[in-house]
Structures are given as structure tokens and as C-alpha cells.
Amino acid sequence: VPECWSNCSEGLVTIPLGIQGKEGFYVPNYLLDQEPSLSDWTRSGTAEMLRGLGAVLLGPPRSWSPAFSSSAALAAALGLNMTVPQSEADYMALILDSLKWRAPIAFYQWRPHMITSNYPVQEVTLPDPVAPADHQQKLRKAYFEAIDLVQAWSPHLVDSLAADILRVQLR
């Protein structure tokens, strides 16, 4: 379904959905059963616990900016290496294969999403961001902040595949 955030601002209609979206890092429940303190990454020793379990820290593909930048900053602050998939398909395959085979993984994700809604995973509590080394960037309140989700529609899409899909769904 095509999106047109940059060139469809004229006449753009948004409708609040009444829910918030939130990015973060998630750990499967089977890892939390082994090490319950992994749910809180503000505690010291998180990196050592993840390494001790042989866990992979999976970030988003580089093309997912600013999610990639925030994830890389978090990994650096924790002293962890982050695995970076080449594409969304690789990213999803790595998560789903890890969950299927109960492999140790901690991964970037957001809610609502089918992974966070349908699999036994828990969002972890993240530490506050550290001040950027170059002092040129503004310090963020959090690596990832919740946002109010909206449905967006533009009259520029009236003759698009997106409009056709909506018409079928509304019948």
C-alpha cells in the first residue's frame, strides 16, 4: 500500500486511533525464565548477562532511520555489539527463527506489531540515554518514545491501490 508522507500533506486527514505506539527492545519469555533480571536493562551487568547467555542483540536494518541510530546508540552505551540485518525480510527471519528454536536473542521491535502481539516476548526497561560524545546533538529523554497513533488519509490517494483496498474492506 503506497504511503505519501512527504508529498501528500495538502488535504491530509488524520484520525486518532486512541492507542500509542512504542519502539523498544524485546526479550523472549524463555530467556526471562532463565534470567528474570533481563527485563530491566537499567541494572548494571545487563551486557554481561546477555553475553553469558550467548544472546544476539538484533537491531533494525540501517535503512530504518532513526530507529537504527537509536538502537546503535543504546548498544554502544551498553557496550554490546549489535547484529544489523540487511533487509526487513532478513530481520523478520532472524527474529522468527530465534523464537522458533528458542535461541537467545534480544531484538528491536515496536508495538503494536504482530511479533509483540502474538509471541511470548516482553519489552525491556531501557536506561536513559547518555550524552552524545560530540555534544552537538541534543540529549534525548529516551531512546524510544511512545507516540499517539493516527490513521492518515490523503485525497491524492483516491485513485490508488490503497483506496481500492479500503473500498473493499468497507463493503
Image (cartoon, grey):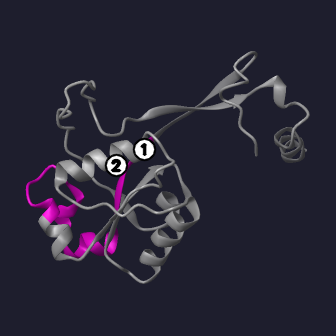
Q: Nearer the viewer, residue 66 or 100?
A: 66
Residue in view at x 20 percent, y 68 percent: 50
Q: 10 Å neighbourhood of mark 1: few (<14), some, or many (≥20)?
A: many
Q: Nearer the viewer, residue 103 or 36?
A: 103
- In this view, the residue farthest toward the left is 44
Horizontal and vertical percent position of residue 10: 74, 15
Give yes or no for residue 43 being in the magenta stretch. yes
Q: In whole angstroms, how far apart are the C-alphas of marks 1 and 2? A: 6 Å
Q: Please give left or right for residue 83 compared with residue 43 in the image.
A: right
Left or right position of 129 against 96: left
Instruction: Name the amino acid, label 2.
Output: Ser
User: In the displayed image of the protein, which residue is found farthest to the top?
Assistant: 10
Which stretch is magenta? 22-47
Q: Position of residue 149 (x, y in %)?
A: 55, 34
On residue 55, the disc is none
Question: What residue type is disc 1 on?
Answer: Ala
Q: Which residue is mark 1?
A: 67
Mark 1 in CB contact with mark 2 (< 8 angstroms): yes
For the point 71% across and 37% down, which residue is it?
3
Looking at the rendered structure, the secondary structure element under dot 1 is helix
Q: Quadrant of residue 60?
A: bottom left
The residue shown at (15%, 75%) is: 52
Residue 166 left/right relative to 14: right
SS at badge 2:
helix
Q: Quadrant of the C terminus?
A: top right
Residue 93, compared with residue 155, is above or below; it is: below
105 is higher (above) or lower (below) than 100: above
Residue 126 forms part of the magenta stretch: no
- How far across and how far down the image is residue 121, in percent? 39, 64
Can the viewer see residue 49?
yes
Residue 125 seen in the current view? no
Residue matched to label 2: 71
